Amino acid sequence: MVNEALITTTLGNGLRVVSEHLPGSRSASIGAWFAVGSRDEAPERSGASHFLEHLLFKGTEERSARAVAEAIDGVGGDMNAFTAREYTAFYARVPDTSASMATDLLFDVLRRPALRGSDVDAERQVINEELVAALDTPDDLVHIVLYETLFAGHALGREVLGEPETIRAMGPDDIADFHSRWYRPVNMVIAAAGNIDHGELVATVEQHFGDLTTGQRPERTPVAPDVGERVGTELPVEQIHAAIGWRSLSHDDPRRYALAIANQILGGSPSSRLFQSIREEQALAYTVYSSTSGYADTGSASVYAATSIDRGAELLGALDAEIDGLLNDGVTQRELDLARSGFEGSVILGLEDSGSRMSRIATGMALRNTVLPIDDFLAALAEVTVDDVNAVIRAVYGAPATVSLVGPGRGLAACGI
């Protein structure tokens, strides 16, 4: 089905511009997605994408960080960014009357960042604090170690924030080189949603970025097949935090719809198997959930839960039992119907504002060079059968698992580590 409100234009240098007009909207969301993330960094530059993300909001030679913040705050808007493993995103959401101002401001800091030495030094300290906080937070640390082990020796396994030694070593020239090499039209998507005029947006994009040469895409190395380790990280906390992970599907694998439903059944909602069994029936954990992520050539699936030190082994046994039950017994038609309708509803409700619509179309274009209309997405979900879900469960959760545990030494020992 064609979404007539969705318009895409590709500039001569390869930069893609996509917008979705939302009738009746009084807001405008504008974003720039770059198909470059932590996966695309050299080992000695680990954390460069995230470092650059911080620095771009420090402003240009003419605009200070305060001036950037005050311009957006002054209209009640929001301007932010985030770094992922395969892309980095920058966006602003403002009242529609301030769309031109926010667009010019966002494009200015993306095209002409100052990258002052003093700002680099200041953000280095901020990022160090962010790293320390992540390594000191057990539910963050358990997932950091899980990824390091699940994708051992590969860039996908490295922490997005970088490493303390690489952050210390990077200077303004290193970050400027990363910006000039990768922030090029071939890797760039400009997306907008809300009360947006596509022609005006394209003209503004052309003004700011039309003179850039196309650039090159990053070359990505496939992951090695070896997985299945069990690792423990000692931390003086009062719980055992457990994360179990599997290699999973790429973001364009046609089985991803079945996997989304399988995840919903396993631990994606309060009615899921993990929540009902681990929390409601066995009272083993306050927080328990499952999740999935897809990348260009692989993906991850995981479950997480935390419990008291003396119940760690019991929790691991319960998690294993739920996974085994999923593999051995499969899912029922009733579970499929409930999970599908719940997932559909959450997707629809999540697209009620211009920011979420902008993010969806930007991510689709950056990762797959296309935007699947919502009706087509829902139709693909509707076609998923019980056999499809059970097949993807066997393919993903039946593969070798990696286990990451974080907790005090005696708790890890009780879990066999």
Image (cartoon, rainbow, N blue to C red):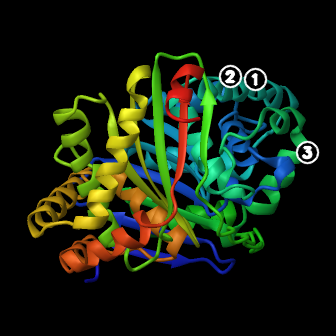
Query: Mark 2 sits on what residue?
Result: 129
Q: Is residue 355 visible?
A: no
Q: Position of residue 253 (x, y in %)?
A: 44, 77
- Taking the image as shown, residue 224 lies to the left or right of residue 344, namely right
- From the viewer's perspective, is the residue at label 1 or at label 2 nearer? 2
Work out whether mark 3 precedes mark 2 in sequence or the reverse, and give the earlier one.
2
CB atoms at circles 1 and 2 under 8 Å apart? yes
Query: Mark 3 sits on what residue?
Result: 173
Cα distance, mark 1 to mark 2?
A: 6 Å
Q: Position of residue 274 (x, y in %)?
A: 26, 45
Cα distance, mark 3 to mark 1?
A: 18 Å
- From the viewer's perspective, is the residue at label 3 or at label 1 nearer? 1
Residue type, numbered disc 2: Glu
- From the viewer's perspective, is the residue at label 3 or at label 2 nearer? 2
**Which disc number belongs to residue 115?**
none
Q: Kindly state the secondary structure of the residue where label 2 is placed.
A: helix
Position of the N terminus, as image quadrant, is bottom left
- Crowding at label 2, few (<14), some or many (≥20) Cα neighbours within 10 Å? few
Position of the C terminus, as image quadrant, is top right
Query: Mark 1 sits on what residue?
Result: 125
Residue type, numbered disc 1: Gln
Residue appearing at x 51%, y 38% in the figure: 79
CB atoms at circles 3 and 1 under 8 Å apart? no
Q: Position of residue 78 (x, y in %)?
A: 45, 36
Q: Quadrant of residue 168?
A: top right
Residue appearing at x 40%, y 57% in the figure: 358
Q: Kindly state the secondary structure of the residue where label 1 is placed.
A: helix
Q: Quadrant of residue 406?
A: top right
In the picture as drawn, the residue positioned furthest to the left comes out as: 334
> Which residue is nearer to you in this view: 308 or 26?
308
Q: Quadrant of residue 155?
A: bottom right
